[in-house]
Amino acid sequence: MNVGFEWDKDKDLENIHKHGVSFNIAQHAFFDKYRVIAKDIAHSSSEKRYYCFGRVKGGILTVRFTYRVNNQIRIFGAGYWRKGKIIYEKENSIQK
């Protein structure tokens, strides 16, 4: 199964300015074999949203996303946040 990524160009530029991470780089978190996917339970119920925690460029990147039709993952936020790193390390220490 092939998965594709999509995002809003303006939101990408905003994320680069605010968090220093492009969505082009953020998609690499999904290719970490130890990545962790978690539901975003605090978000609205009209659309299911998720977090992907994965290692990218030596750090743990948190990517906010949703699933779309035709195996598309729509990215709408990303950053190197401490909480994501803690979740990633905790989940991976349990699995090993």
Image: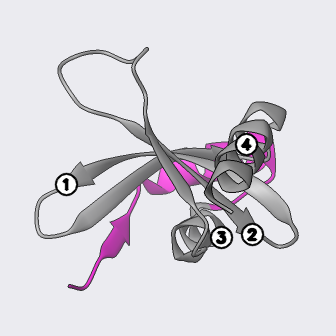
* Amino acid type at mark 4: Lys
Task: Judge whether residue 70 is colored magenta.
Answer: no
Earlier residue among tags 4 and 2: 2
What whole-number distance in Å separates the C-alpha atoms at marks 1 and 4? Answer: 29 Å
Mark 1 and 4 residues: CB-CB less than 8 Å, in contact?
no
Of residues 2 and 12, which is closer to you in this image? 2
Q: Is residue 65 above or below residue 5?
A: above
Residue 68 — which label? Answer: 1
Outermost residue, right side = 58
Q: Secondary structure at mark 4?
A: helix
Residue 25 image offset from top left, x and y in percent: 65, 70
* Amino acid type at mark 3: Ile
Residue positioned 54% across, 53% down in the render: 36
- The residue pinned by badge 4 equals 90
* Circle 1 crowding by C-alpha within 10 Å: few under 14, some 14–19, many from 20: few
Left or right of residue 19, residue 33 in this image: left
What whole-number distance in Å separates the C-alpha atoms at marks 1 and 3? Answer: 20 Å
Left or right of residue 53, residue 11 in this image: left
Residue 10 image offset from top left, x and y in percent: 51, 49
Mark 2 vs mark 3: in front: 2
Mark 2 and 3 residues: CB-CB less than 8 Å, in contact?
yes
* Circle 4 crowding by C-alpha within 10 Å: few under 14, some 14–19, many from 20: few
Earlier residue among tags 1 and 4: 1
Start-end of magenta stretch: 1-22
Residue positioned 88% across, 70% down in the render: 58
Of residues 37 and 19, which is closer to you in this image? 37
* Circle 3 crowding by C-alpha within 10 Å: few under 14, some 14–19, many from 20: few
Residue 25 — which label? Answer: 3
Mark 1 and 3 residues: CB-CB less than 8 Å, in contact?
no
Earlier residue among tags 1 and 3: 3
Left or right of residue 82, residue 65 in this image: left
Residue positioned 54% across, 68% down in the render: 27
